[in-house]
Image: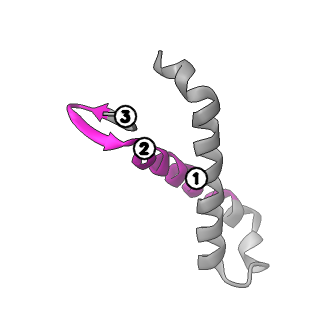
Amino acid sequence: MTGAVDVFGLYLPWLMLLAGIALLLLWGARRLLALCGAYRWIWHPALFDMALYVLLLWGVSLASLRWGPAFLS
């Protein structure tokens, strides 16, 4: 099966693992932005958070394409 990762005998799509990593990164980024007071200047925080999540997921997926095979072998 291609595009799947084995987690304790359960095969999950590779994108689900990447989405979880991006979600953890989003949590950290939101905390940093809240501490800096950046949300005072953002018009719609929910849309901003969704766009930030999509960008983080895109970045994590690009990083996995570049460095992922080195970690798997």
Which residue was labeled with disc 3? 2
Give amino acid for label 1: Leu
Between discs 1 and 2, the one toward the N terminus: 2
Is disc 3 placed on a helix, strand or loop? loop
User: Which residue lies at the image location 64% right of the left edge and 31% below the top edge?
Assistant: 66
Q: Is residue 30 above or below residue 68?
A: below
- CA gap, disc 3 and disc 1: 20 Å
Return the residue found at the far left: 9
Neighbor class of circle 3 (other Cα within 10 Å; few <14, some 14-19, many 20+) is few
Between discs 3 and 2, the one toward the N terminus: 3
Residue 30 in the image: x percent, y percent?
A: 62, 62
User: Which residue lies at the image location 60% right of the left edge and 44% below the top edge?
Assistant: 60
Residue mark closest to the camera, 3 vs 2? 3
Q: As drawn, is 37 to the left or to the right of 53?
A: right
Q: As drawn, is 9 to the left or to the right of 40?
A: left
Camera-side residue: 2 or 58? 2
Which residue was labeled with disc 1? 57
Which residue was labeled with disc 2? 17
Q: Is residue 27 above or below residue 67?
A: below
Find the magenta span and give its range: 6-32
Return the residue found at the far front: 1
Residue 13 in the image: x percent, y percent?
A: 36, 44
- Residue 14: say if magenta: yes
